[in-house]
């Protein structure tokens, strides 16, 4: 399921998440331990802040 519509939320896991603080997509997905499968941890290289994304 790969659309080209930019208004669709990317849920494939390939595209970098956008940082909620600075809007950068220079982010890296982290892999937290534990059962929290409905959310993912990311780290922004733009402002060096970790952030969570709910999926
Ligand atoms: Zn940032």
Image (tube, rainbow, N blue to C red):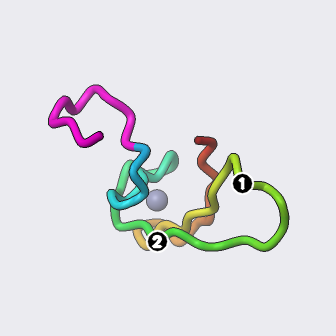
Q: Main secondary structure of the magenta part?
A: loop
Instruction: Identify the element where label 1 is drawn.
Output: loop
Q: Residue at x 20, y 36 (%)?
A: 3
Residue 2 x, y percent position in the rendering: 24, 42
Q: Residue at x 22, y 32 (%)?
A: 6
Residue located farthest toward the right when viewing the structure as drawn? 34
Residue with the mark numbered 1: 37
> Quadrant where the N terminus lies?
top left
Residue 28, labelled with which disc? 2
Residue 30 x, y percent position in the rendering: 59, 72
Q: Quadrant of residue 26?
A: bottom left
Which residues fall within the magenta stretch?
1-10
Q: Is residue 6 left or right of residue 38?
A: left
Asked whether 12 or 47 is in front, the reply is: 12
Q: Residue at x 72, y 71 (%)?
A: 32
Looking at the rendered image, the disc whose residue lies closer to the viewer, 2 or 1, is 1
Residue 16 x, y percent position in the rendering: 37, 59
């Amino acid at each position: 399921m790969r659309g080209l519509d930019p208004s669709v939320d990317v849920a494939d896991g390939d595209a970098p998440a956008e940082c909620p603080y600075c809007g950068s997509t220079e982010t890296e997905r982290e892999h937290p331990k534990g059962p929290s499968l409905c959310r993912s941890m990311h780290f922004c290289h733009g402002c060096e802040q970790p952030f969570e994304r709910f999926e």
